[in-house]
Image (cartoon, rainbow, N blue to C red):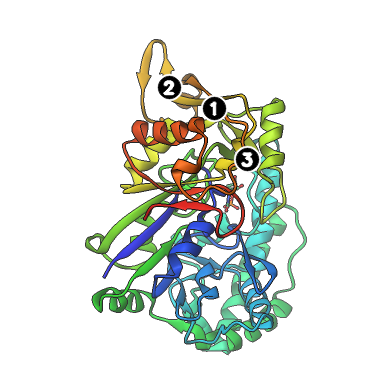
Amino acid sequence: MAAIIVVGAQWGDEGKGRVVDRLAAQADLVARYNGGDNAGHTVVAEGHTLRLHLVPSGILYPHVTCLIGAGVVVNPARLVQEMDALAELGLDIGPRRLKLSAAAHIILPSHQALDGAREAARGQAALGTTRRGIGPVYADKAARVGIRAGAMADPEAFARSVRHAIETHNDLLTSIYSQPPLDAQAIAAEFHEYARRLAPHLTDGSALVGEALATGRTVLCEGAQGTLLDLDHGTYPFVTSSSPVAGGALTGLGFGPAYVERVIGVAKAYTTRVGAGPFPTELTDAVGQRLREAGGEYGTTTGRPRRCGWLDLPILRYAARVNGLTELALTKLDVLSGLEVLKAAVAYERNGERTQYFPAELGMEALALWRPVYEQWPGWAEDIRDAHRRSDLPTAAQAYVTRIEEQIGLPVTFIGVGPEREQAIVSQ
Ligand code: IMP
């Protein structure tokens, strides 16, 4: 009878897939609520490693129904590609298991071209987007000129809409950005085929979620990106164009807050960010490099090296407030093993004034005036990847986790101590 929301507490890539994977075993419906194929998570199935960008990782559990919700933007080529890869592994990706909300919006190649052209036009001020068309497709959605997945129910009419949209985008590409036009007719023909393939998966997503909740089933809401990439509550304009925060699960899936039982904020034991924008605890020295290598901090979607830095507790406090977190999941604690000293930002200061919360909403200029205040703690040398209980951890690692709980005022119910599914300390 409950909705569980899994949300990124930092700038994305916190390891939400891990946490979703674990909880999906007990869920009936796993529903992705925001973003598009800018997200990426790696799943290991049947000895194969797959990088999924759209299909919820719950697909690996045969009893789970998966929904791509209304708040998601879908690149049909990518979705079909992922479905084919999953089918090759013998997984059931039929329309009874994998559902696509009719209200989700469709990403066109011209959205991707516009994303690239706008980034190029920004020059030094580029946002560092994934160039997957995310900004332009959400802009079309807000401008009420987008194409919704439900249009695929009539492949001919859908193809006509695609053609018309590409022609409109071509005007922008050629006249404003001096880019070559795309072949509207060829793309329309390609999208006609995607529509034929995907139409059977279309559903009323809100009805599906509502019925599951009303009949006592568990709905796991899977967020993409993270709190500080939220369009409203992140470090604007260095954000994505959707609502990764917990509220985005309600609007992106279409159900009410009374059903929400748990809101799990996933955070790395340190901080990373891909793309441009402020990152006050960033480490550009050897320690940052070490975190990148030890943590394999290269983007799943773009392969870009992630910027790495110390844990930022004001960010986690901010995430706790904005999302109404009930608990924290801490991932990649093992990456910190071997560091003699660990630092974490515990507050921010500006002209003698202190704040406990990351001042994300005040804007870039205001944020630039605030400086992180650090505390430092002893590290640990031991390999912790075989720890199954908290008491198996070295004292310094236990103290690190306890301090986070005390500072944020939330329990840490999951600790990732290694990349394998079983390398985790779970207390709920
Ligand atoms: P966009 O979502 O492609 O428009 O990119 C906007 C910003 O969000 C860029 O800084 C991206 O690097 C970042 N971003 C988008 N998706 C993810 C993600 O899944 N993980 C981490 N960063 C992301």
Q: Which residue is mark 3?
A: 383
User: Which structural element holds mark 2?
Assistant: strand
Residue at the (48%, 25%) spot, across then down: 345
On the image, the x and y values in percent for residue 378 come to 54, 23
Kindly check if marks 2 and 1 are in contact, taking CB atoms under 8 A apart as contact.
Answer: yes
* Circle nearer the N terminus (2, 1): 1
Q: Which sits earlier in the primary sequence, circle 1 or circle 3?
A: 1
On the question of residue 13 being in view, the answer is: yes
What crowding class fits label 3: few (fewer than 14 Cα within 10 Å), some (14-19), or many (20 or more)? some
Q: Residues within 10 Å of mark 1 (few under 14, many from 20)?
A: some
* Residue 381 percent coordinates (x, y): 62, 31
The tag earlier along the polypeptide, 3 or 2, is 2
Label disc, if present, on residue 348 of the rendered structure: 2
Residue toward you, 266 or 318: 266
* SS for dot 1: loop
369 horizontally vs 308: left or right: left
Q: Nearer the viewer, mark 3 or mark 2?
A: 3
Q: Is residue 180 above or below residue 327?
A: below
Q: Which mark is residue 280?
A: 1
